[in-house]
Image (spheres, rainbow, N blue to C red):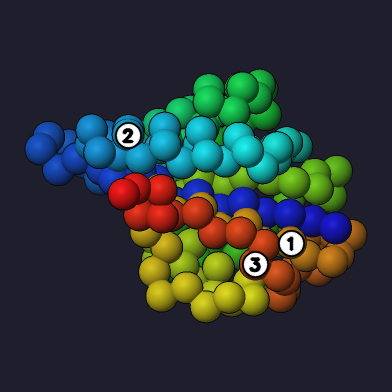
């Protein structure tokens, strides 16, 4: 069994004149990442590996999750291939994961994550929102065999707010 948890970066800030890759989180984004990661603690998910896009907003979201989940930063790898908006590079990345990992978390971007959630999961999602989390399980032994799985969970910030 292989399990992937996709987390789209939290809401970014547009108030700074920086390149796309350097854009930071907004205050709302930081709050949503804290809210969602603290909710995710309830599921006792223990990742074997964590991967993030190098984009500031994705990496900051990732680090908030790592801190709140109290998992080792040694599990984190940053990979340029995850700075992908279409989904082809992310899909290829997933299929090339080391089979020693059974549970992975990936922090990245849309449209890639909505495309992966819909092509690999069993539940149609119109749009994975900022800081949206989608967990998909696959009944395979090898990441190269990942095609269609079962969407086990979605957690979106709007679901946790009054």
Q: Nearer the viewer, residue 55 or 24?
A: 24
Q: Residue at x 67, y 62 (%)?
A: 152
Q: Name the N-terminal-most of marks 1 and 2.
A: 2
Give the residue at mark 1.
137
Q: Residue at x 63, y 72 (%)?
A: 121
In what element is the residue under mark 3? strand
Q: Position of residue 144 (x, y in %)?
A: 79, 64
Q: Which residue, as the protein is rendered here, is positioned at the far front?
A: 162
Taking 42 as reference, is 78 left or right? left
Q: CA distance from mark 3 to mark 2?
A: 25 Å
Q: Dot 1, how many residues are within 10 Å of its Cα: few (below 14), some (14-19), or many (20+)? A: many
Q: Position of residue 81 (x, y in %)?
A: 52, 51
Q: Name the N-terminal-most of marks 3 and 2.
A: 2
**Residue 68, above or below 107:** above
Q: Residue at x 79, y 56 (%)?
A: 2
**Residue 152, above or below 126:** above
Contact flag, marks 3 and 1 (Cβ < 8 Å): no
């Amino acid at each position: 069994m292989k399990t992937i948890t996709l987390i789209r970066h939290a809401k970014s800030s547009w108030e700074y004149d920086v390149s796309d890759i350097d854009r930071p989180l907004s205050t709302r984004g930081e709050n949503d990442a804290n809210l969602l990661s603290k909710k995710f603690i309830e599921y006792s998910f223990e990742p074997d590996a964590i991967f993030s896009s190098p984009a500031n907003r994705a990496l900051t979201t990732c680090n908030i999750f790592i801190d709140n989940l109290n998992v080792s930063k040694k599990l984190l790898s940053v990979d340029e291939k995850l700075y992908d908006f279409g989904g082809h590079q992310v899909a290829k990345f997933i299929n090339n994961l080391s089979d020693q990992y059974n549970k992975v978390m990936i922090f990245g971007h849309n449209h890639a994550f909505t495309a992966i959630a819909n092509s690999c999961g069993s539940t149609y999602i119109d749009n994975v929102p900022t800081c949206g989390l989608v967990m998909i399980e696959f009944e395979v032994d090898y990441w190269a065999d990942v095609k269609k799985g079962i969407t086990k969970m979605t957690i979106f910030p709007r679901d946790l707010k009054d």
